[in-house]
Image (cartoon, rainbow, N blue to C red):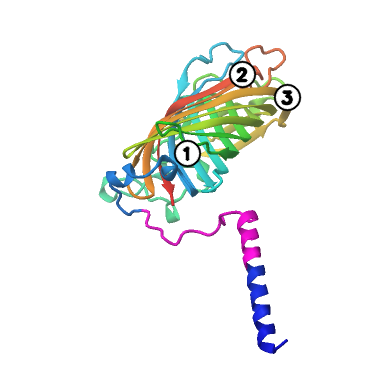
Amino acid sequence: MSVRKLTASLITTLAILGAMSNGYAQEHVPPADPFAFDPDFQWFRPVTNMDLADMKPEKRANTGWFATYDRLALYGSRPELNSGDSAETRLDSGWGHRYEIGYMLPDVEHGWLFTATNNDVSANDTTERERLNRYNEDDFPDYGEKGGVTVPPFGAINPAEDANNIGYYERIYFVSDSLNVMDYNSYELNKTWRMEPYHYGGILEPFVGFRWGRLNDLNQQQQYTSTGDGSIVIIDDAPGNNAALGENYERLFTNATITENEVLAGQFGFRYTKFRDRFTYSADFRVFTGGNLQCAMSQQITETTVYDGAGTGAAVSQVILGKTPTVYTRNEEFVIGFDLRGELAYQLTKSIKVRGGFQVVDYATGIWRGGPSVAGNPLVGGDPNQDYVMVGGTFGIELNR
């Protein structure tokens, strides 16, 4: 066989093997590289109603990488406390954020979705109590001919706790009793599937996944007493009494309990989406159930401020801080709940939508608030098997490259 014929035969064989391997790769290798970003980042390119009308629903749905951000204004329900005056049927306003990032394979119609949510509610019954010396005379600027004194170097009082409250020009205790203080965070990872569009263009996306929720509740009561109003009575006829502090001092007593709820739950649900002109209607529903690992941390703190006299301008002699050891209490509960969302989005550009909607999150059972009960005091503590509801509005933006 000649060299020319051998070379031609070898080239033909390599071409056949190359075609076969290419077909094998197309069949078994994923159809898209999730990290192969489209270099055409024309997110702000205008889009017309005609462009949207000519697109099929599956072409308008999110493909590849997509992300959303929503500002949350969710009201939270109050705790059920043993005191009986917690008014758990009331809701207090809260603010938060929701972030989502997902990836949907365009050909096989399945992907992943990660969601992070936080919402903080803080409602307190606060009273301003004027402190024993009313204000610090050294903490005022020099107004020249108008009088006053010059502040210390760099305009700071040392120690800082002897200064007047910033913005008040007087010394005040903000005595606060918590009504509803909750720090809520959740993280979700879901596997999603996209079904074929219905006759009128609606698309259903079922999903299953995992939810990690963190609900930290604060229950706090404070009490202010002083020799100035007679709420502290000096006793000097026994060893170890408070007579050594003198005749002019005040105390702020704080009883605080932080109750942590770590919810580990599985969930399933669906998302329904329908497109009409520039508008996108969507509904999202998920049910979750799992366990709650609970831990309550209780502590009492006392702050005593001693003065060298009574009335305005008295100097601080010393500040005495005392606290009890932290008491930990643990518990476990079963949790079940649901998360419901509804949204309306408007297509602004090729890849950007603005949207608004509502959200309801209900942890129906298994949430501990208020901390443990205290022996001999039936008014302290809360039920470890409570519910927590959040409801309100959302507003955000959506990006689909």
Left/right of residue 18 with respect to residue 146 in the rendered view: right
Residue 331: mark: 3
Task: Find residue 18 and report its horizontal and vertical position in percent.
Answer: 64, 69
Residue 315 spot, x, y in % from top left: 50, 39
The answer to which of marks 3 and 1 sits earlier in the sequence is 1
Residue depth check, mark 3 versus mark 1: number of the one nearer the observer: 1
Residues under numbered marks 3 and 2 in contact, where contact means CB atoms less than 8 Å apart? no
Q: Which mark is residue 120?
A: none
The amino acid marked with disc number 1 is His
Tell me the CA gap for discs 1 and 2.
24 Å
Which residue is nearer to you in this view: 8 or 181?
Answer: 8
- In the rendered image, residue 106, in percent from the top left (x then y), is placed at 51, 48
Contact check, label 1 and label 2, Cβ < 8 Å: no
- Which span is picked out in magenta? 19-43
Secondary structure of the residue carrying numbered label 3: strand
Density class for disc 1 (Cα within 10 Å; few <14, some 14-19, many ≥20) is: some
Closest to the observer, 208 or 205:
205
Q: Residue at x 57, y 54 (%)?
A: 31
Above or below — where is 127 with respect to 109? above
| Residue 244 x/y as whole percent | 65, 30
Comparing 382 with 7, the one in front is: 7
Q: Which labelled disc corresponds to residue 97? A: 1
Q: Based on the displayed image, in which of its 4 quarters is residue 35 positioned? A: bottom right
The N terminus lies in which quarter of the figure?
A: bottom right
Q: What residue is disc 2 on?
A: 386
Find the residue positioned furthest to the left: 145
Is residue 23 magenta-colored? yes
